[in-house]
Image (tube, helix red, strand yellow):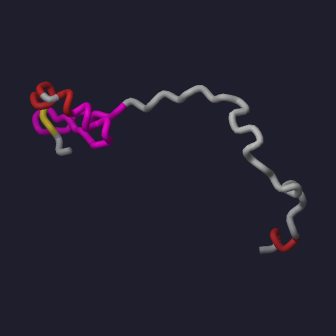
Amino acid sequence: MPQVNIHHAKTHLSELIAAAERGEEVIIARANRPAVRLVPVAAERRARTPGLHRGALCMAEDFDAPLPEDFWNS
């Protein structure tokens, strides 16, 4: 979205907020000089649930075995 002046921003604030929420860059200018950038607030993180995927991951039996010598020589 192109930059808009403060008067336009006041009269079309809802539209500008919606554009920012969609990910568009909204620049508000004063006297044709960029003054602020309107950005959405980051979404809140949900609390983690311990054990949610218990048993979903499987690890090879030799995951902690020493690496072969040629691994270190390359």
Q: Residue 56: where, in percent of width, then height? A: 73, 44
Q: Residue 35: where, in percent of width, then height? A: 22, 34
Q: Looking at the rendering, which quadrant does residue 28 occupy? A: top left
Quadrant where the image shows the C terminus: bottom right
Is residue 3 shown left or right of residue 49?
left
Q: Looking at the rendering, which quadrant does residue 62 occupy? A: bottom right
Which residue is located at x 32 percent, y 42 percent?
23
Is residue 74 shown left or right of residue 1?
right
Relative to the observer, which residue lies in front, 63 or 58? 58
Quadrant where the image shows the N terminus: top left
Q: Is residue 55 magenta?
A: no
Is residue 12 shown left or right of residue 37?
left
Q: Residue 69: where, in percent of width, then height? A: 88, 71
Q: Residue furthest front?
A: 55
Looking at the image, residue 74 lies above or below residue 37:
below
Looking at the rendering, the stretch of residues picked out in magenta corresponds to: 16-40
Looking at the image, residue 66 lies above or below residue 4:
below
Q: Residue 26: where, in percent of width, then height? A: 24, 39
Which residue is located at x 45 percent, y 31 percent?
43
Number of numbered markers: 0
Relative to the observer, which residue lies in front, 1 or 59? 59
Q: Looking at the rendering, which quadrant does residue 6 occupy? A: top left
Q: Is residue 38 magenta?
A: yes
